[in-house]
Image (spheres, helix red, strand yellow):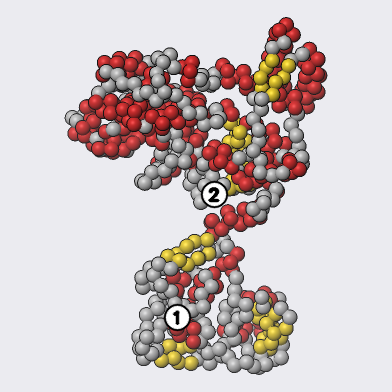
Amino acid sequence: MTFLKITTSVVASLLATISIYAVNVPDSLSTVVFDSITIVAKETTQAIKDTTKLKITNLPKTAVTSEAEFDLLIKDSEVLVTLDKLLYEKFYKKSFFILDTTTQNQLTFEVGEIPTYPDSIYEQRIEALNIETPFELTYNKEVKSFINLYAVKKRELTARMLGLAEIYFPMFEEALDKYDMPLEIKYLAIVESALNPAAGSRAGAKGLWQFMYGTGKVYGLKVTSLVDDRYDPYKSTIAACEHLTDLHDIYNDWSLALAAYNSGAGNVNRAIRRAGGTKNYWAVWPFLPRETRGYVPAFIAVNYVMNYAPEHNIYPMRPGMFYYDIDTVTVNDIVAFDQFNEMLGIPLDELKFMNPQFKKGIIPATSGKKYTIRIPRRFVADFLNNEQQLYTYKTRKGIERDKLLAEVKKAKNRNIHIVRSGESLGLIAKRNHVYVNQIKRWNNLRSNTIYPGQKLVLFGSGSSKYYQKSSTPVMRSSEKTKHIVKNGENLGLIAKKYKCTVTDLKEWNNMRNSKIYPKQEIIVYRPAKKTKSSVKEGKYLYHIVRKGDTLWDIAKEYDGITVDKIKSLNHIKNSHRLKPGQKLKIAIIS
């Protein structure tokens, strides 16, 4: 702990420094600064009289890099740091500071004691809550069973949720107030996810508000290989407010809206029909799906336990931070959590906890797509002062900016195909619009043999690997040869024998599929014997033009070579002017 004694000389120094900063900073910051100075001045008057000390919490940065590396950072003004700490210290004492259990425990329970109450007490307390909410909070045996769950069986979980509420409830209440919704809806997130931002169900629901993929998409929650907005605490909260508002507009009843949020509007509509058209939750309750019948009773029980936790000897287990310990910054370029950790010293576990939407710890920001992330407030100044250096910072793990971009592109263009029974490389190549030799090169296959369950890497046309060719084209004879299919042969084996691809065989024989049968005649073009018409010089393979050669004839002699490619390599505009003995570039030899 650090103690600061306020004196008149300190105030004079602060005011002098602030006057310098006020000239070069935005009006909003100047206002904050002068408001803070006013607070300090008031404390100073009292400090001179009785030399009272103001205690300032100095939260240490747990960095993984050396002190020498932090010396490279642009340091924030010590004056502004001090004023910020004074401001938030006072703010916490007014609002979100949780009192110690010794002062809350007015009922003098023993440590570990689990209080129990008669039904009349539960009913009386829930009725007191019901008066202050548009929800129909009722006490019955279903609600009692959930009170027993949260207040007795899962007491430690409830204590943790009381602590997490200090982080999430202020954000929930702000959004609910914006949409003019009952503030009690904040308790729904406890029923859905127990305030775990990374929660996921077996059915595929994600995040604090447990959005399914389809529903989330309707309300603007995007999902990519790197980012899942359903995990974003703020975005998912806004989506939940919009979704619940739409459901309330349908039923004009918040309990039915909650039931529809859980099971879908279709199931609630069917329950209403079976109940004779009555739009009352407890009237349709017997007709709801079994898993939904406990949904609203659990919501009522959470309302009760969160308001009467001290009466059950349950107190918050603080997570080490409060809502106002967290701030947001805008990221303008691609960056990884590792870079925040190693350069700024932000703990990785805190980054992951505050930003669970970034599934791989990569923030894929670009000039056209910016992202907002949450970081501990004490690191905001360091981020703002060193933002550009952060984007180019090389971490100890070797994650550099170029590698991150490659990871983003790879996620878009790289696919995994699992071989199914009866599939061949030719069939897989055709379905994915690639060549057999490309699949073999991407997967380091020496033959065309594959087996069911085998994983094959396939690249789309957006990947540079898609355009890679074999190192040297195979020169072929221009004379047709007939191959007689033998028992047990397939196109893959025949292609291997003649050093061509299955696609080549199908093109030469106008075949629509890969089916062949014994004694069938197949046209092939054998690899040509080495002649003086093909020469390797430097990085090019050359063809020496013979009498009667045309570009079409020449292109047909080499695998993967087209007339247009020969024209491009040799800057040919008129193909009729080929001369015997002329050297033409055929391909670049890698």
- At x 62%, y 22%, the residue is 88
Tell me if 345 is positioned left or right of 149 in this view: right
Quadrant in the picture for the N terminus: top right
Horizontal placement of 529 versus 502: left or right? right
Label 2 and label 1: CA atoms lie apart by 39 Å
Residue extending farthest to the top is 49
Residue 571 to residue 102: above or below = below
Q: Amino acid at mark 1?
A: Gly
What residue does disc 2 label?
Answer: 360
Q: Is residue 18 left or right of residue 355?
A: right
Where's the C terminus, which quadrant?
Answer: bottom right
Side of 62 where 319 appears, left or right: left
At 40% from the left and 82% from the top, the residue drawn is 490
User: Seen from this angle, which residue lies furthest front?
Assistant: 110
Report the residue at 53% width, 90% height from top: 526
Residue 437 x, y percent position in the rendering: 52, 75
Residue 130, percent from left and from top: 33, 17
- Indicate the secondary structure of the residue bearing disc 1: helix
From the viewer's side, name the closer residue of 148 and 134.
148
Rendering coords of residue 244 (x, y %): 39, 31
Given contact means CB atoms under 8 Å apart, are the residues at marks 2 and 1 in contact? no
Q: Locate residue 8: give its quadrant.
A: top right
Residue 492: mark in rendering: 1
Q: Judge by depth and name the residue closer to the eye, 112 or 148.
A: 112
For marks 2 and 1 on the same chain, the one whose residue lies earlier in the sequence:
2
In the foreground, 352 or 189: 352
In the image, residue 85 sits, relative to residue 43, either above or below, namely below
